[in-house]
Image (cartoon, rainbow, N blue to C red):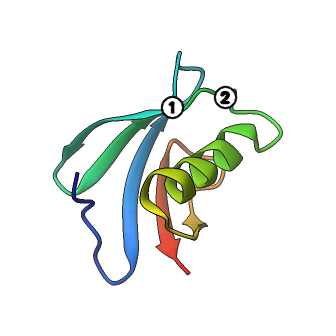
Amino acid sequence: MKLPVLNSQIKVKVTPNSSKTEIKSIENNIVKINVNAPPEKDKANKELIKFFKKQFKLNIRIKSGKKSKEKVLEIV
């Protein structure tokens, strides 16, 4: 699967509390991803970062949207 990377950034829309962490689809350069973690105490964000590191060998950080379902990730 090829990720839509623009200027070292990836736009994602996260659905927390899913049964497993997986990419659902890519539409209009936005990666829709289910995360198997609740959106509290930064757990969903940590799971998202862990998923990208494991699946794509990418070190990322959340550039914007830490408390939102829509986020911009930056490859570091």
* Left or right: 50, with 29 as reference point: right
Q: Residue at x 40, y 51 (%)?
A: 12
Picture quarter with the C terminus: bottom right
Mark 2 → mark 1, Cα distance in angstroms? 8 Å
The residue that disc 2 covers is 37
Q: Is tag 2's residue or tag 1's residue first in the polypeptide sequence? A: 1
Residue at the far top: name it: 19
Q: Position of residue 68 (x, y in %)?
A: 57, 46
The kind of residue tagged 1 is Thr
* Left or right: 36, with 34 as reference point: right
Query: What is the quadrant of residue 3 in the picture?
Result: bottom left
Q: Position of residue 62 (x, y in %)?
A: 59, 64
Q: Residue at x 39, y 80 (%)?
A: 8
The residue that disc 1 covers is 21
The residue tagged with tag 2: helix, strand or loop? loop
Q: Position of residue 35 (x, y in %)?
A: 54, 32
Q: Do callouts 2 and 1 mark residues in contact (Cβ within 8 Å)?
A: yes
Q: Tag count in the figure?
A: 2
